[in-house]
Amino acid sequence: MQEFKGSSNYVVSSDLLRIVNIAMVLQKPLLIKGEPGTGKTMLAEAIAAALGKKLIIWNIKSTTKAQDGLYVYDTVQRLYDSQFGGEGVDDIKKYIKLGKLGEAFAADEQVILLIDEIDKADLEFPNDLLWELDRMEFYIPETKETIKAKQRPIVIITSNAEKELPDAFLRRCIFHYISFPNQAMMTDIVHAHYDNIEDHLLEMAMRAFYRVRDLPTVAKKPSTSELLDWLQALRLGGVDPEKIEEELPYAGILLKKTEDLTAVKNAKTRVKNGYRW
């Protein structure tokens, strides 16, 4: 069994590192929750890169059904072929297209399967996957064929906690919540992306960034990806680090709602504990 030890471009806490490896040893799906921008999706990418395995991503939408991940029977194409003289119309297998879960099961080598943002689907979606995730197989009645995993995939499931998942589903998963990085870890994350960033610029930008996040009046708090974009803008714009806290330049990169921009502007005008915010 391979062990995940992290990667050069993804900063991982020791707790998360341990839980990833425990999930792989126990061969159970790893359910990752956390606010947007905490690196949930990137975790699967980092595991795949570190272990040298193919990554299959199943992006979940509000209209996604469990069946979509198993297979789709393309009846429309078969009808079209029958009307216009297509060959092999009687071969139903020709019109069976595997979904992302089906691809993971059918792969000759072990893959990483990311079921991304499972909480976007309806409440029945997780329960509809229980049998397949437990047994690692599913049946196609049209061809009377059972697709069984050749190599049990490493399953990573992400959720933004927009809705509660069923208890029966949760019992089958290993769970971990990724907390938003503190300043020390965030510094490591930034250095993984920008290894030559100026220390003073980073220090002043981080102070302003966490001050914005700590404001109770900010509804949509800026995430890691927005901080990285903001830092790049500050560098390219040649902003004086000493003016970052006072002016908060390019605030529209961090804050995406008019009311949040207004809340920060109002906070900056108040004098509290010797600084203007």
Image: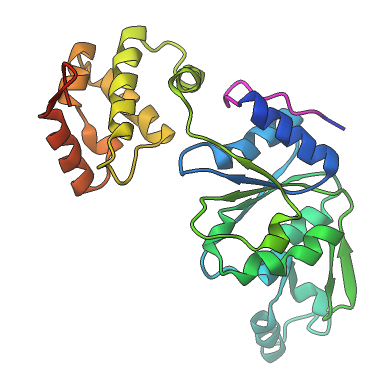
- Decide if residue 55 is on the left or right side of residue 11: right
Q: Identify the residue at image location x=74%, y=49%.
A: 29
Q: Identify the residue at image location x=73%, y=59%.
A: 101
- Decide if residue 142 is on the left or right side of residue 115: right
Image quadrant containing the C terminus = top left
Residue 70 shows in the view: yes
Looking at the image, the residue that sits furthest to the bottom is 83
Q: In this figure, which colouring scheme has been used for the structure?
A: rainbow
Residue 139 on image: x %, y %? 85, 72
Looking at the image, the residue that sits furthest to the top is 199
Give the overall secondary structure of the magenta segment.
loop
Residue 28 vs residue 214, the one in the foreground: 214
- Answer above or below: position of 101 versus 68: above
- Decide if residue 276 is on the left or right side of residue 186: left
Residue 266 vs residue 41, the one in the foreground: 266
Residue 52 shows in the view: no
The span picked out in magenta is: 3-12
Residue 115 on image: x %, y %? 64, 53
Q: Which picture quadrant has residue 106?
A: bottom right
- Decide if residue 8 is on the left or right side of residue 149: left
Image quadrant containing the N terminus = top right
Q: Identify the residue at image location x=33%, y=23%.
A: 231
Q: Identify the residue at image location x=27%, y=40%.
A: 255
Residue 258 on image: x %, y %? 19, 47
